[in-house]
Image (cartoon, helix red, strand yellow):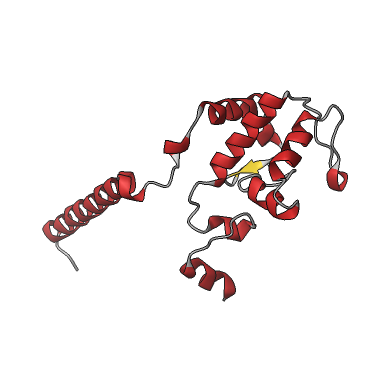
Amino acid sequence: MLSKKQARAFFLGGTLVTFLIFIGLTVFSLSKEVDQTNHGNITAEVVRGKEIWESNNCMGCHTILGEGAYYAPELTKVVDRLNQKYDGNGEQVIKSILMSQGPWQPNGRKMVAYGMTEQEASDVVAFFKWIGEIDLNGFGEVVGVDRKISPLAKEKINN
């Protein structure tokens, strides 16, 4: 049994060690060497695409980077997936869906007809491409959107 003085010292020592570990991990995660944000590739088109994404409330149906609704498909790596499916024409497929004047209805779920202009659709595609270049640390393989996965994560999935 610890005395009151020993318990206080144990508590303060543990708090100090935990605080120092927290500060160290914070500094490490904010360092440029481990930056995974892809912020260096942001262009005006990407910003406009993000604004279009938000103004149309696309997250009300779709998920991106694991955030959003689950009614419609995950769009984190949508350009890559559609390029594989449509022989490198994924961007054109996305643009045609966004520029469609009528509702698009794949698999029985109806997507609103946004009737976007060519420029708006290109901006949204630029946003999707930018999102698709973010390092996901293997998260995407779990949800089926990333082709790269860390060996540790692969081992956990296979067991």
Instruction: Indicate the position of residue 107 as horizontal and vertical percent values.
Output: 85, 48
The answer to which of 14 and 151 lies nearer the viewer is 151
The answer to which of 155 and 132 lies nearer the viewer is 132
> Residue at horizontal 73%, vertical 35%?
95
Q: Quadrant of residue 8?
A: bottom left
**Residue 56 seen by the camera:** no
Hey, which residue is sitting farthest front in the picture? 88
Instruction: Indicate the position of residue 127 as horizontal and vertical percent values.
Output: 58, 35
Instruction: Indicate the position of residue 3 as horizontal and vertical percent values.
Output: 14, 62
- Indicate left or right for 112 with 145 as reference: right
> Residue at horizontal 50%, vertical 46%?
134
Hey, which residue is sitting farthest bottom in the picture? 159
**Position of 97 relative to 141 (above/below):** above
The answer to which of 37 and 42 lies nearer the viewer is 42
> Residue at horizontal 65%, vertical 44%?
75
Instruction: Indicate the position of residue 93 as horizontal and vertical percent values.
Output: 75, 41
Q: Quadrant of residue 57?
A: top right
Hey, which residue is sitting farthest left in the picture? 5
* Image quadrant in which the C terminus is located: bottom right
**Residue 35 seen by the camera:** yes
**Position of 9 relative to 29 (above/below):** below
* Image quadrant in which the N terminus is located: bottom left
